[in-house]
């Protein structure tokens, strides 16, 4: 997996190309990937593990803000536990940047990932930076890996 990641980052981003046809293709790919990100968040928000499993590779791993490595099953177990405790969560992304590599077969999405936790005491919002790596496999974009890291608030604390 590490070698695969090194290969992705050694490839020149196609966003640097000036060709109009490539630009249109990349815009279409970017729109498709942004829709996939929305679909992924909807699957998480509705606790639809079957739909989410269709969007990720079998060896998908999320590196959390706490440095944990979680697969899809572990992510849903955590979400279901929180839901049963009465904590509703809403997951969403914002400020997304898309870079496309390897002739439209690899894409890296970066941005801000937010989780709103609705608890008895009110709403708590956690923000983090995120990087999602997608690969086009058998004609479908699948999420290969995801990474989140904490954002510092202006007062220097992390949320």
Image (spheres, grey):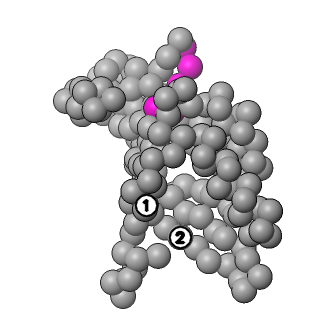
Residue 63 percent location from the top left of the image: 43, 49
**Mark 2 highlights which residue?**
126
| Vertical placement of residue 29 versus 86, above or below | above
At a point 60% along the width and 40% down the height, the residue shown is 72
At a point 71% along the width and 44% down the height, the residue shown is 43
Q: CA distance from mark 2 to mark 1?
A: 10 Å
Residue 52 percent location from the top left of the image: 66, 36
Badge 2 density bin: few <14, some 14–19, many ≥20, Cα 10 Å: some
Marks 1 and 2: in contact by CB < 8 Å? yes
In the shown orientation, is residue 58 left or right of residue 135?
Answer: right
At a point 53% along the width and 27% down the height, the residue shown is 57
Residue 24 seen in the current view? no
Q: Nearer the viewer, mark 2 or mark 1?
A: 1
Magenta residues, start to end: 139-144
Residue 15 percent location from the top left of the image: 30, 33
Answer whether residue 82 is magenta in the image: no
At a point 64% along the width and 68% down the height, the residue shown is 116
| Vertical placement of residue 80 versus 107, above or below | below
- Locate the N terminus and report the quarter of the image it occupies: top left
**Mark 1 highlights which residue?**
65
Badge 1 density bin: few <14, some 14–19, many ≥20, Cα 10 Å: some
Camera-side residue of 66 and 15: 66
**Label 1: element kind:** loop
**Label 2: element kind:** strand
Camera-side residue of 32 and 23: 32
In the shown orientation, is residue 50 left or right of residue 13?
Answer: right
Answer whether residue 140 is magenta in the image: yes
């Amino acid at each position: 997996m590490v070698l695969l990641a090194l290969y992705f980052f050694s490839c020149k981003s196609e966003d640097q190309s000036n060709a109009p046809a490539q630009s249109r293709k990349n815009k279409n790919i970017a729109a498709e990937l942004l829709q996939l990100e929305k679909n992924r968040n909807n699957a998480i928000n509705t606790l639809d593990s079957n739909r989410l499993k269709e969007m990720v590779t079998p060896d998908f791993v999320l590196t959390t803000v706490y440095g944990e490595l979680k697969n899809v099953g572990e992510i849903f177990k955590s979400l279901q536990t929180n839901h049963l405790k009465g904590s509703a969560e809403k997951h969403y992304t914002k400020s997304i940047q898309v870079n496309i590599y390897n002739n439209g077969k690899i894409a890296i999405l970066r941005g801000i990932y937010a989780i709103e936790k609705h608890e008895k005491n009110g709403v708590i919002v956690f923000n983090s930076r995120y990087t999602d790596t997608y690969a086009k496999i058998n004609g479908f974009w699948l999420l290969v890996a995801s990474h989140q890291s904490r954002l510092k608030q202006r007062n220097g604390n992390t949320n």
